[in-house]
Amino acid sequence: MRVFHLSTCLRQLLVSSSKAKNLRNLRPCLDSQSPACTIPTFPILSSLYRNFCSIPACVWPADLPPATEWGYGLKGPDTWPSKYPQAGGQNQSPVDIVTSSIQPRSYDTPLTWKYGPGICKTIVNTGCGWRVDVQGNDSELSGGPLSESYELVQFHSHWGNENTCGSEHTVDGKAYAGELHFVHWNRDKFPSCSEAVPSPSGLTVIAVFLEEGENNPEIDKLCETLSKIPSKDDRTDLPEDLDPVAMYPADHSFWTYSGSLTTPPCYESVTWIVFKNPITVSHEQLDCFRRMKKPCTEEDSFILKNYRPPQSLNDREIFECAA
């Protein structure tokens, strides 16, 4: 991965502009093919720069440990701390949410989100599941427990081989059939997603429980693409109208706490927002996830379980916020 820098003439033009009051908004983006920068505070120069190069999204870092170095079988969660020390830290995720010990919390501003049309571009087989990569900077998550604005970079799912397991977070010991994770990075505090991922307050993840029930039309759009990505690192395009909000529950009450990524290297950089209410997905949709194939080097052929069990809460508190 490499960072693209503004050309000398354009940089000089930006600095000399009378509107160049806050250069922190010149946010570099990382992309393996055509990196670029957005210029949100200079409307005239933005159009000039769009003619100079494209403006892809900041992407999920490619230098994180690949799924071939860890897993959920012989290289499962119990072995992670020996190779990734942060996985043995005091602020790990997921956790069991014990509702009797949760503290109510209200916030000055409500939790809000905005996702522009067409930002969900591709879906990739990671070797331990699927991941949707987001392109463009037309998304924002703010308010509630967040003091800065965050941008959606990717979302993925965890599931089990039956409906009594699969979610990573549990509620009073109960697991759901699966769990969606919508990963956002702190664009106010960090110039790139790569810098945000390992840093305190760098990430916010919205978690949505999956429960077997009625068919979910938005999940159907994902399932229709999975047959096109049978092997690790395979990727394909997604429908233009895929909408993250359609995969959020109608009731937006949530729990929140400070934790970590649930996959190696398990950086303790995440503010978790866990919706209290699940969404429903059909039995066929869950089976579609379970039919995804692992790399041929793995001991089983299908991805039947890709979740980390709950970790100790230690001295942390979980707060509850009503919708």
Image (cartoon, rainbow, N blue to C red):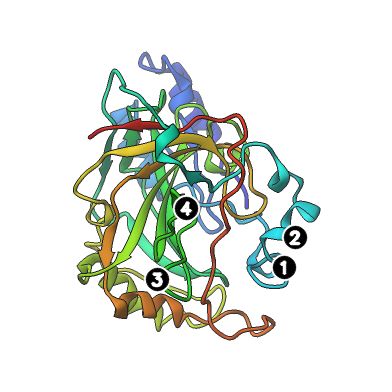
Q: Nearer the viewer, residue 189 or 97?
A: 97
Give the residue number, with chain letter if any, for mark 2: 79
Query: Is residue 278 placed above or below 160 in the rendered structure?
Result: above
Give the residue number, with chain letter if any, for mark 3: 163
Closer to the camera: disc 2 or disc 3?
3
Q: How far is the residue under mark 2 from the one under mark 3?
A: 25 Å
Q: Is residue 6 visible?
A: no
Amino acid on which the number 1 mark rests in the picture: Lys
Q: How far is the residue under mark 4 from the one under mark 1?
A: 25 Å
Tell me: 103 left or right of 28: left
> Measuring 44% from the left and 75% from the top, which residue is drawn there?
162
Q: Indicate the secondary structure of the residue bearing disc 4.
A: loop
> Measuring 54% from the left and 62% from the top, which residue is drawn there?
307
Tell me which label, 2 or 3, sits earlier in the chain. 2
Query: Can you say which quadrant of the picture contains the C terminus?
Result: top left
Q: Position of residue 96 (x, y in %)?
A: 50, 47
Tell me which label, 4 or 1, sits earlier in the chain. 1
Q: Nearer the viewer, residue 310 or 125?
A: 310
Amino acid on which the number 3 mark rests in the picture: Asn
Tell me which label, 3 or 4, sits earlier in the chain. 3
Q: Indicate the secondary structure of the residue bearing disc 3.
A: loop
Q: Position of residue 116 (x, y in %)?
A: 25, 47
Q: Position of residue 211 (x, y in %)?
A: 31, 64
Q: Residue furthest right?
A: 82
Tell me: 217 left or right of 291: left
Q: How far is the residue under mark 1 from the one under mark 3?
A: 23 Å
Tell me which label, 1 or 3, sits earlier in the chain. 1
Give the residue number, with chain letter if any, for mark 4: 173
